Amino acid sequence: MGTFITNSEEKSLKERLQTLIGNSAELKFLVGFFYFSGIRELYETLKTLYESEALKEEHLKILVGLNIDKSAYGIYESARKQRIYSGNKLKKDFYKS
């Protein structure tokens, strides 16, 4: 069953997502727009899960409708195509940064 979450006076979307990420086996998001800079807000929660080995391969899924941060995706896609980094190496480098 899906749940709609948005900002309110009592609780911000950031706080709610941090709680959900830490307490859920899997999260799926359907969004119209997505920018990787927004991951910065969730970084510490994701890093904590990663370090405790609780962050699984498909823990977080984001389906984007209209627009994505193409520059950040291009960097990832280029590294993947050139096989510069494995998926695990990309994740490790991300969480160490």
Image (tube, grey):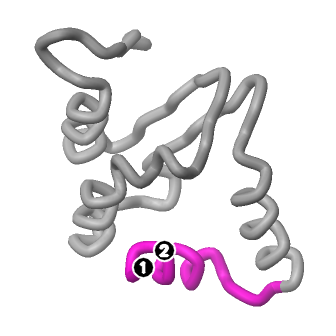
CB-based contact (under 8 Å), mark 2 and mark 1: yes
- Residue 95 belongs to magenta span: yes
Question: What amino acid type should be assigned to the residue bearing mark 1?
Answer: Ser
**Element marked by disc 2:** helix
Question: What amino acid type should be assigned to the residue bearing mark 2?
Answer: Phe
- Residue at (55% x, 79% y) in the render: 88
Quarter of the image where one finds residue 17: top left
Residue picked out by circle 2: 94
Residue picked out by circle 1: 97
Q: Nearer the viewer, residue 26 or 93?
A: 93
In magenta, the rendered stretch is: 83-97
Give the main secondary structure, helix, strand or loop, of the magenta stretch.
Answer: helix
- Residue 87 belongs to magenta span: yes
**Element marked by disc 1:** loop
The location of residue 43, given as percent across then percent down, is 35, 58
Q: Nearer the viewer, residue 70 or 4?
A: 70
